[in-house]
Amino acid sequence: MSYNKSNPDDRLDNVEKLQDMVQNTLENIEKAEETMEFASSEEKEMIKEKNSRREDSIHSFREEIKDEATDRKNGYQ
């Protein structure tokens, strides 16, 4: 018989994980912009739209980093 154990809420490295996500997303934006040189006009538009969504994600990640850093400072109460 197997029991599903829930993992404890370990938030100790959330800030670092979020920072990695920001860095990875920035790298994806750069790579996408490099591919635009060889893209058709339709592909360029799709890349621009996707990069816009990526920038929105980065903004959200940074807000979450601030929240997590504050929570960490306050001892996750």
Image: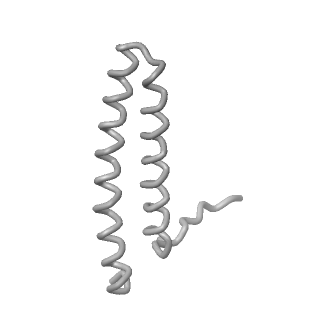
15 relative to 6 in the view: left or right: left
Q: What residue is at 43 percent from the left and 48 percent from the top?
A: 26
Name the residue at the front extreme: 37
The relative height of residue 65 versus residue 49 in the rendered view (above or below) is below
Q: Quadrant of the N terminus?
A: bottom right
Name the residue at the right extreme: 1
Is 67 or 46 nearer to us in this picture? 46
Is 33 or 76 nearer to us in this picture? 33
Q: What residue is at 29 percent from the left and 53 percent from the top?
A: 59
Residue 25: give x, y in percent of width and height: 44, 47
Is 43 or 35 nearer to us in this picture? 35
Q: What residue is at 34 percent from the left and 51 percent from the top?
A: 58
Which quarter of the figure has residue 2? bottom right
Colour scheme of the rendered structure: one colour
Q: What residue is at 47 percent from the left and 71 percent from the top?
A: 9
The relative height of residue 48 versus residue 26 in the rendered view (above or below) is above
Q: How many marks?
A: 0
Residue 77: give x, y in percent of width and height: 33, 83
The relative height of residue 54 versus residue 60 in the rendered view (above or below) is above
Residue 35: give x, y in percent of width and height: 48, 27
Is 32 or 71 nearer to us in this picture? 32
Which quarter of the figure has residue 32? top left
Residue 48: give x, y in percent of width and height: 33, 29
